[in-house]
Image: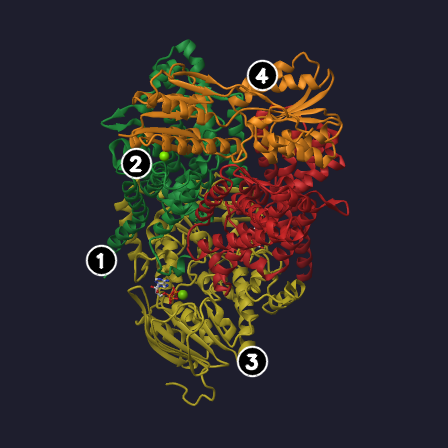
Chain colours: A orange, B yellow, C green, D red
């Protein structure tokens, strides 16, 4: 009989999630070709409530043996995942940890505070005390808070002024508009932390429109969008670096989960991926031209 | 009987028209011909099928069987008012105006004058002013319809119809809410059109008007054609008899003497509200008090203010000698006051609902039993109302909007009477009601008064006010001009007060 | 003659009623057949239970929305209101735990507060609409933004979560079963019955219909229009709070993404069920079927990977349109006088 | 006597007209004053230009929505429609580049396709509503889901990006200025003027009003109700495609998050401007002010850090409600017969 593995994650509505979806689909094809008795079922959901419903359906209808889940949010999905575990399935949690320890058998994740910290370290390296930066944040969520808090903690005491921070919702349009307004408001900005590559694209457009993209101004995004990595490879100075938050982590999780059924050794455990700083030197190894992200 | 030697051929002819709505027949093989330059009146009881026939003759309904001949050619009239292009224009019994739009916009709706795609607004406004002046009403073309009184709306409909260069002008009860003065002006326009060779069809329940203006009369009863006759040969009584199918006794009931010592149930002192200036009057137990006046004289406004439908700026209202101010209709109702609006379409009935919910809506608390509505009691109430007010529908399930105008009016009366009021104010009690039923309603009102209910009748039909009121208050421009009693209640006096030629000194 | 008419009347009425409800019912039946064909597990007891339980949220909210819409209003704030109520409820329960302990008392306190908040929030919407004379669309669009941002604020951008100790006590409200049916389904049934009675068997329901049908007629018929309209929003608020009471134990948390789009789903359920958006005609039975239809669509789409996940929205959109088209129940026949 | 009345009436009307438009104008003025007090840079030329340019999207769409709403309809699909059109436009231009090269021809082809798509999408909404006799709310809720999921599908969940070679040619449509005003603002002005003329100076505008005011009156006046209603959706589609044509060169991309919530913003702009949601009364001038008000609110909130970011939605909601309350223009006065 086949081994059924459910894979549940949020509906891709922005590029990073689309990249994750792409990696998941690639992994599904690869693993199903490799192991004919493995069936991976990919489901995406548009909000935590829908994801909880999808988890119920995976158990009651598909009768899954294992679950790979990237929770929409940690808190609300803790109980639903616990229910899946009670059905006897192996649980792999990706990216956002559940709020109760010990539910998951396997944990694969990026590192959100590290992303903020690495960005701040880079900023400190390029800027001097008294320089001004602005911050464009994501959608108000735990992830955003973790990144932001770690960033601010690292910046603290460096003498760099954070003029203001606004939510740009990991969205290009909002990034553009918020940055336009920051530019009208603050005559002197030396650098921008955009936290995310999508926001960064909007920020760059606003800088270029206002003609304030010179004078060593730079923008730091995050996540590792292929266009951004490409332009880093090409030596762009406006976005000189990127901080990795790899969407491929879902594929890693699927690999590990299948391995739990197929390999003989124990695979349970925690796999934390780093928040690597991508620079022109190492960019080539993070570049996937076929991925949508 | 027919005037066989007519020199003109009929412009429009209904030939054995029958009509059923679903499985319910309402017209049975009716024929009627309309000649240019004549006024052809169509009369019949409520629900006889007059409006239906008129709608068929103007293309709004298709006949189930029978032919329509236009200029002696059989035609299938285009639907939805497009027959206007052929010169056939209908004024609907129920007003057909877009409330949020202005007078000018409504009059030209569907046939705006444009120049290179742009509206010629000034030209249209001027033309509308002209039409309105012709029929002698003082309304600005740029007023919204929703700001007009129902009579003014009716005049707008008339202006709209007159503006349309009609060959055949069909008017379904255009005078139902008009006072005699306005009707006069209106008839002058009708005469003018007639002399220009327009064929005019005129539906009315006011038989004296029919007598006055019609050249020929066609009578319908229960959807059957009863006859077409030259108007000169008919007296109003004869018409009534042909319509109803029996001899009508006196239209008005014998007047009970009012008890001058009866308690005053309603006293109004120096009432001011929008459209009302310093109005004072009182109403005794068991009295029928008529209110007369021209259009817009403020009669409606007085009672809307009294019943909590309109805010009062100053003055006193005393019910049973106790000063009261109703802030909602519900409190007025609970105190025994009920107001019956004349605007049954916009304010009276839910047209998209059936009779049952409409009937009990006003007095609904009466039908509550153990938190829920008592369906059996409601059903009984409907049966009783149908009997009591002689409401006739061939299909008891149709929406109220599909009922004949007169039967809607009866339902409205029944609805208000469900609350068993001690004081009832009836605005235009017999609007659109046939003579036979009118008689019943007058007797009904008289009986109410005899039981001790106080009744206020606001009416534009002077004979009606004169025929049943104990006293008559005449208003003009929001003020009370005088109160008539006894032999003073006659047309002459009322007209003189209403026109402002005479005024009682304030006492 | 009069007697004959009366009898046909009642019969006719019953018949028409049947056809009208038949529309959504047929749509639901077709969906179930499709679901079964795609995967026989669709009709498994477990799945049907899940489906019913899930419908409860939207269903309960939609019952409230039926009143608002019938009386000619609209409420766009329900989703955010649910989120805000859930958030405040969680804060209250977490802090009450210190004094009351993680027991029934705490949960009851939370539920009581939820109900009060729901009534209050509904009342605010109602008063702004009626006394403030501001279009319901704008009022509730405004409060939608306000509630949504308040929950973000309370949660400090993250998630508010119920203490795990309380969850144990509260869990059965979502996960427990009574007589074989999950608790939320019971709540849904009770709300539906109450709603149906209120709409069809009381003066209040009649008043809502009358106001939606013609507000000035209602006013002239001694109906306290403003009060009744406000009441519909209060009922809507109550329904939202009840839905929240059974929602919180499901996920034990509230965040800015709780209840997103519920307003549109609730309104869609109401209209799929045959209530007219402009008011004057409300059908609770249809609303319940509408909620079941919406949930079933989502459920079926989780059942198959025949179509790209990305096209879920397309399927959903198509099915909603088709369901409403079926619901009209007069395919092809011209309905000249209804337009 | 008649003359006297006529003059007072006209005066009255002009007065009333002034107050009616004055409402949104006052609200906008107040916002600007607040903005200036918070930060004088608010009134800098750069910021005002940004503001106007940003308003153009919602403004152009809202002009179309004014027609739909005036005629008694509603269109929830505009945001998704914009996203879908932008997506298809980008795909077409990218692939046309191979044959036509990255020149004007490609851009014109893209814009042409956008307009055709907009007209087509609007027509579909219109026909489903009128011929299909399905409630506009449901039809457009359905197409909203469909378009949104189509763009996700085309973009494979991610972002569709315009080739950089084309961007150079297309850029001026967003970033270029003519006589000191950015190109999008010119488009907005032209659309507004056309919309105003169409609404107030042509028979079509009157027909929309008549249909929204009373559909059967319109029908009985030989107005082709279905055709006019369909036309309003087509106009809406055209406006959406024009907005898309100026949106695409801004960031050169489209994704599933493009145009989210634009439908609510557009409807809010229309209603803030004084158009009545139930139809029968449409004001293009008000709509334009409404769009400016909405954009200004967002702009002001970016100009201050006085309030928590999380409370943006609260401020937005409050300001919208207050703006509409101002717009009523009859503060305190009882309007008994209007209720
Ligand atoms: N659309 C409709 N559907 C069903 N029945 C209808 C419809 N229109 C009219 N009827 C019925 O046809 C009959 C004739 O109505 P009609 O309106 O022609 O009467 P009428 O002679 O104009 O009466 P009134 O003097 O009261 O206006 C009535 O019984 C009415 O209920
Ligand atoms: N809310 C209002 N605001 C301003 N004027 C008003 C208002 N209501 C009524 N009026 C005016 O008050 C006058 C009296 O109107 P009302 O409807 O009471 O007259 P009526 O005697 O009943 O005549 P009709 O037969 O035309 O209804 C009219 O000129 C009307 O325009
Ligand atoms: Mg698979
Ligand atoms: Mg009639």
Give the mark nearer the N terminus: 1 vs 2.
Answer: 1
Q: Chain of mark 1?
A: C
Asked whether the residues under marks 1 and 2 belong to the same chain, the reply is: yes
The quarter of the displayed image where residue D83 is located: top right
Task: Indicate which quadrant contains ligand 3.
Answer: top left
Q: How many angstroms separate mark 1 from mark 2 (CA)? A: 33 Å
x and y, in percent, of residue A225 in the image: 57, 31
Indicate the secondary structure of the residue bearing disc 4.
Answer: helix
Q: How many angstroms separate mark 3 from mark 2 (CA)? A: 67 Å
B45 relative position to D173: left or right? left
Could you tell me which residue is drawn at 58 percent across and 28 percent down?
A284
In front of the other: A235 or C201:
A235
Q: Are marks 3 and 2 in contact (CB under 8 Å)?
A: no
Residue that label 4 marks: A150
Please state, as top left, top right, bottom left or bottom right, where the N terminus of chain D lies in the image.
bottom right
x and y, in percent, of residue D230 in the image: 50, 57
Is D117 located above or below residue A76 in the figure? Answer: below
Q: Residues within 10 Å of mark 2 (few under 14, many from 20)?
A: some
Asked whether the residues under marks 4 and 2 belong to the same chain, the reply is: no
C235 relative position to A113: left or right? left
Residue that label 2 marks: C193
Asked whether the residues under marks 1 and 3 belong to the same chain, the reply is: no
Q: Are marks 4 and 2 in contact (CB under 8 Å)?
A: no
Could you tell me which residue is drawn at 52 percent across and 22 percent down?
A143
In front of the other: D312 or A287:
A287
Residue that label 3 marks: B196
Q: Chain of mark 3?
A: B
Residue that label 1 marks: C3
Indicate the secondary structure of the residue bearing disc 1.
Answer: helix
Q: How many angstroms separate mark 4 from mark 2 (CA)? A: 52 Å
Which numbered mark, 1 or 2, is in the foreground of this view? 2
């Amino acid at each position: 009989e086949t081994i059924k593995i459910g894979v549940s994650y949020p509906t891709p509505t922005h590029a990073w999630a689309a990249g994750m979806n792409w990696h998941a689909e690639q992994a599904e094809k690869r693993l199903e070709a490799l192991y004919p008795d493995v069936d991976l079922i990919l489901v995406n959901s548009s909000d935590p409530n829908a994801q909880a419903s999808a988890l119920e359906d995976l158990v009651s209808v598909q009768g899954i043996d294992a679950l790979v889940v990237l929770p929409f949010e940690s808190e609300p999905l803790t109980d639903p995942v616990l229910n899946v575990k009670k059905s006897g399935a192996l649980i792999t949690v990706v990216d956002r940890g559940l709020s109760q320890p010990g539910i998951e058998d396997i944990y694969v994740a990026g590192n959100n505070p590290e992303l903020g910290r690495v960005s701040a370290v880079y900023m400190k390296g390029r800027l001097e005390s008294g320089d001004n930066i602005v911050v464009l944040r994501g959608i108000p969520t735990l992830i955003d808070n973790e990144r932001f808090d770690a960033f601010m903690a690292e910046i603290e005491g460096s003498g760099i002024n954070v003029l203001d921070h606004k939510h740009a919702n990991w969205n290009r349009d909002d990034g553009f508009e918020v940055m336009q307004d920051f530019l009208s408001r603050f005559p002197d900005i030396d650098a921008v932390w955009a936290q995310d590559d999508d926001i960064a694209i909007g920020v760059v457009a606003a800088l270029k429109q206002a003609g304030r993209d010179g004078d060593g101004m730079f923008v730091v995004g995050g996540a590792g969008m292929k266009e951004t990595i490409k332009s880093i490879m090409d030596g762009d100075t406006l976005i000189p670096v990127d901080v990795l938050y790899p969407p491929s982590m879902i594929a890693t999780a699927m690999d590990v989960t299948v391995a739990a059924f197929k390999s003989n050794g124990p695979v349970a455990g925690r796999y934390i991926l780093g928040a690597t700083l991508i620079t022109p030197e190492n960019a080539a190894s993070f570049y996937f031209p076929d991925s949508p992200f | 009987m027919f005037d066989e030697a007519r020199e003109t051929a009929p412009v429009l002819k209904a030939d054995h028209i029958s009509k059923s709505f679903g499985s319910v027949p309402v017209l049975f093989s009716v024929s009627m011909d309309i000649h240019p330059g004549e006024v052809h009146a169509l009369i019949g009881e409520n629900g006889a099928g007059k409006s239906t026939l008129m709608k068929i003759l103007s293309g709004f309904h298709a006949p189930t069987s029978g032919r329509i001949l236009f200029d002696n050619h059989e035609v299938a009239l285009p639907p939805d008012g497009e027959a206007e292009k052929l010169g056939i224009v209908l004024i609907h019994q129920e007003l057909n105006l877009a409330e949020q739009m202005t007078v000018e916009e409504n009059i030209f709706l569907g046939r705006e004058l444009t120049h290179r795609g742009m509206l010629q607004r000034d030209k249209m406004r001027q033309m509308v002013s002209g039409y309105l002046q012709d029929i002698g009403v003082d309304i600005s073309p740029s007023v919204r319809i929703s700001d007009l009184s129902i009579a003014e709306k009716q005049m707008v409909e008339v202006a709209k119809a007159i503006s349309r260069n009609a060959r055949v002008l069909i008017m379904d009860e255009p005078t139902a809410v008009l006072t005699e003065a306005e009707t006069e002006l209106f008839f002058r326009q009708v005469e003018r059109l007639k002399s220009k060779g327009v064929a005019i069809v005129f539906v009315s329940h006011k038989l004296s008007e029919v007598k006055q203006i019609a050249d020929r009369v066609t009578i319908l009863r229960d959807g059957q054609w009863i006859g077409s006759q030259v108007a000169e040969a008919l007296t109003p009584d004869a018409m009534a008899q042909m319509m109803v199918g029996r001899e009508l006794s006196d239209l008005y009931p014998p007047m009970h003497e009012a008890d001058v010592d009866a308690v005053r149930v309603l006293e109004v002192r120096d009432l001011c509200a929008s459209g009302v200036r310093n109005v004072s009057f009182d109403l005794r137990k068991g009295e029928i008090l008529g209110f007369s006046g021209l259009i817009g004289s403020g009669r409606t406004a007085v009672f809307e203010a009294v019943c909590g439908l309109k805010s009062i700026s100053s003055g006193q209202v005393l019910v049973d000698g106790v000063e009261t101010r109703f802030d909602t209709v519900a409190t007025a109702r609970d105190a025994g006051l009920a107001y019956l609006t004349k605007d049954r379409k916009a304010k009276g009935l839910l047209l998209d609902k059936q009779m049952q919910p409409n009937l009990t809506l006003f007095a609904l608390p009466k039908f509550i039993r153990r938190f829920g509505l008592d369906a059996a009691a409601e059903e009984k109430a409907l049966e009783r109302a149908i009997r009591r007010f002689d409401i006739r529908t061939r299909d008891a399930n149709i929406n109220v909007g599909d009922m004949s105008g007169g039967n809607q009016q009866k339902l409205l009366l029944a609805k208000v009477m469900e609350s068993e009021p001690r004081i009832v104010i009836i605005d235009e009690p017999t609007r659109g009601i046939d003579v036979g039923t009118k008689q019943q309603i007058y007797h009904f009102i008289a009986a109410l008064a005899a039981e001790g209910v106080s009744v206020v009748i606001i009416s534009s039909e002077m004979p009606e006010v004169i025929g049943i009121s104990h006293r008559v208050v005449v208003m003009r421009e929001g003020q009370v001009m005088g109160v008539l009693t006894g032999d003073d209640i006659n047309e002459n006096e009322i007209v003189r007060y209403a026109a402002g030629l005479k005024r009682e000194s304030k006492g | 003659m009069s007697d004959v008419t009366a009898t046909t009347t009642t019969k006719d009425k019953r018949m028409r009623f049947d056809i009208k409800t038949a529309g959504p019912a047929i749509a639901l039946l077709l969906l179930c057949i499709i679901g079964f064909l795609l995967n026989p597990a669709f009709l498994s007891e477990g799945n049907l239970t899940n489906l019913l339980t899930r419908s409860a949220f939207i269903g309960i909210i939609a019952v409230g929305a039926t009143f608002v819409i019938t009386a000619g209003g609209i409420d766009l704030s329900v989703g955010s209101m649910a989120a805000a109520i859930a958030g405040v409820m969680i804060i209250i329960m977490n802090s009450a735990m210190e004094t009351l302990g993680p027991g029934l008392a705490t949960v009851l306190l939370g539920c009581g507060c939820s109900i009060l908040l729901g009534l209050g929030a509904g009342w605010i919407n109602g008063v702004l609409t009626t006394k403030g004379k501001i279009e319901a669309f704008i009022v509730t669009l405004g409060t939608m933004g306000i509630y949504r941002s308040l929950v973000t604020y309370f949660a400090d951008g993250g998630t508010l979560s119920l203490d795990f100790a309380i969850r144990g006590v509260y869990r059965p409200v979502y996960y427990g079963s009574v007589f074989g049916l999950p608790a939320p389904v019971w709540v849904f049934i009770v709300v539906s019955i109450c709603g149906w009675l209120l709409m069809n068997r009381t003066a209040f329901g009649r008043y809502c219909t009358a106001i939606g049908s013609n507000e000035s007629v209602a006013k002239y018929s001694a109906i306290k229009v403003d009060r009744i309209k406000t009441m519909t929003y209060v009922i809507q608020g109550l329904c939202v709070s009840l839905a929240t009471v059974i929602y919180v134990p499901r996920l034990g948390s509230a965040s800015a993404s709780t209840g997103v789009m519920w307003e549109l789903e609730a309104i869609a359920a109401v209209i799929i069920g045959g209530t007219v958006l402009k008011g004057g005609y409300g059908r609770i039975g249809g609303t319940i079927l509408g909620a079941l239809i919406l949930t079933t669509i989502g459920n079926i789409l989780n059942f198959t990977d025949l179509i790209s996940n990305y096209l879920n929205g397309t399927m959903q959109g198509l099915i909603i349109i088709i369901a409403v088209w079926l619901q009209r129940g007069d395919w092809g026949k011209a309905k000249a006088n209804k337009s």
